[in-house]
Amino acid sequence: MGAGERGAGRPIHVEEDPDQESAGDVILGGEALLLRETGARLRAHRQRVGLTQAALARRAGVSVRFLVALESGQGNISLGRLWGLCEALRLPLDRLLQGLGPGGSEKIALVGLRGAGKSALGQALAGARGCPFVELDRRVEEAAGMRLPEIFELRGESHYRAVEARVLDAILDAPGPMVIATGGSLVTAPETWRALRARARTAWLKASPESHLRRVLAQGDMRPMAGRPEALRELGELWAERAPLYAAADLTVDTDTLGEAAALAALVAWVGGRA
C-alpha cells in the first residue's frame, strides 16, 4: 500500500470552526502526506515535552477534538492555528515543516529489514537520478574504524547508535541530492528516525518475512540460519515489531507485489525524476 493510499480515507477538514466537520472535502496525495507528517511531528514533540492533548489544546486555544484530528493526519489546519500550536509548544514553525511539501529534501532514504532491496534499488535509483548512493552502515564502519559486529561486541549498541546518529547528520548536511540505504534497525532509535524523516524523504521497501529470509540466503549469507532452527519465526516477530515504525515513512513500496523493476519505477515516479 502506497503513501497516498494510506491517506486516502475521508479525513476531517477543519478550518474556521474546529468542531465542524466538512463532508465535502477529501484530502489526497501530497496534501495528505503533508498533513500526516505534520501531525506526527506535532504529536512527537508534544509527547517529548510531556504535555497531554488536553493541556496543549488549552494552551493553544483549540479543541481537543481538533488536536486529535490534526495529530492523526486528518485535520486540515490554517496557518494561524498552526502558529498558535507551535507557540504553545515553543517549537519553531520552520523546524516543524522542514523538508515537507513541494521542493522538499533532495535526500532520499530507504528503510526496511535486511533483504528489502535497499542496496540494489538504492543504487538503481541513484543512477536514475544521477546522484551519489550511500550505505549508512558502511559509513558507520568507516567512522568507527571497525566492522559492525565488532562495534556491537566491543563497544555496545549505545556506541553504535551514537556513531550512527553523528554520521547520518553529516550525510544529511552534505549539499546536493543523494540516495541513502539505512540500517534495518535505525527506526528503533526514535530520535535518529525522527531526524531522518524531518530532513529526507523516506521510503519503506516492504516485503514479507519469507521474502526477506529468502533474499538474504540467496545472497549467500547463511548467518540468519546459523544455530537458529526457528529463524523464520523470529524474523516474523521482528517484522511485526518494526512494521509500525517503518510505516511512518513517506512512501511504502511493496516489493513482493511489484517486483524489482516496478518498485524502481514507483520510486522514480515518486521522486519525480528530480536530480
Image (spheres, grey):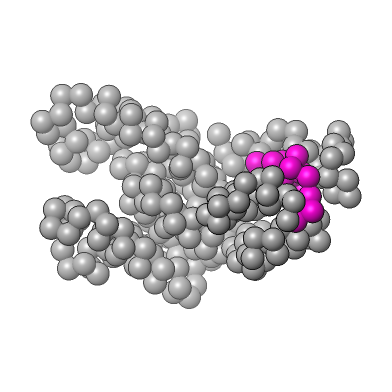
Q: Is residue 168 visible?
A: yes
Residue extending farthest left? 227
Depth order, front residue of 198/261: 198
- Dividing the picture into quadrants, the one containing residue 154 is bottom left
Does the magenta portion include 62? Answer: yes
Q: Is residue 82 visible?
A: no
The image shows residue 60 at horizontal and vertical percentages of 75, 56
Q: Is residue 51 left or right of residue 67?
A: left
Q: Which residues are magenta?
A: 60-76
Which residue is drawn at the image coordinates 39% and 44% (left, top)?
112
Q: Quadrant of residue 235?
A: top left
Q: Is 152 situated above or below 215?
A: below
Q: Residue 24 versus residue 162: which sits nearer the camera?
A: 162
**Is 64 positioned to the left or the right of 136 in the image?**
right
Q: Residue at x 66, y 45 (%)?
A: 53
Left/right of residue 86 with respect to residue 184 in the rendered view: right
Question: Quadrant location of the N terminus?
Answer: top right
Q: Residue furthest bottom?
A: 175
Q: Position of residue 183 (x, y in %)?
A: 33, 51
> Can residue 194 be found in the magenta stretch?
no
Residue at x 15%, y 37% (from the top left corner): 222
Q: How many marks?
A: 0
Q: Is residue 263 left or right of residue 225?
A: right
Could you say which is closer to the camera, residue 89 or residue 104? Answer: 89
Q: Nearer the viewer, residue 25 or 175?
A: 25
Q: Position of residue 236 (x, y in %)?
A: 33, 28
Residue at 55% x, 52% y is: 50
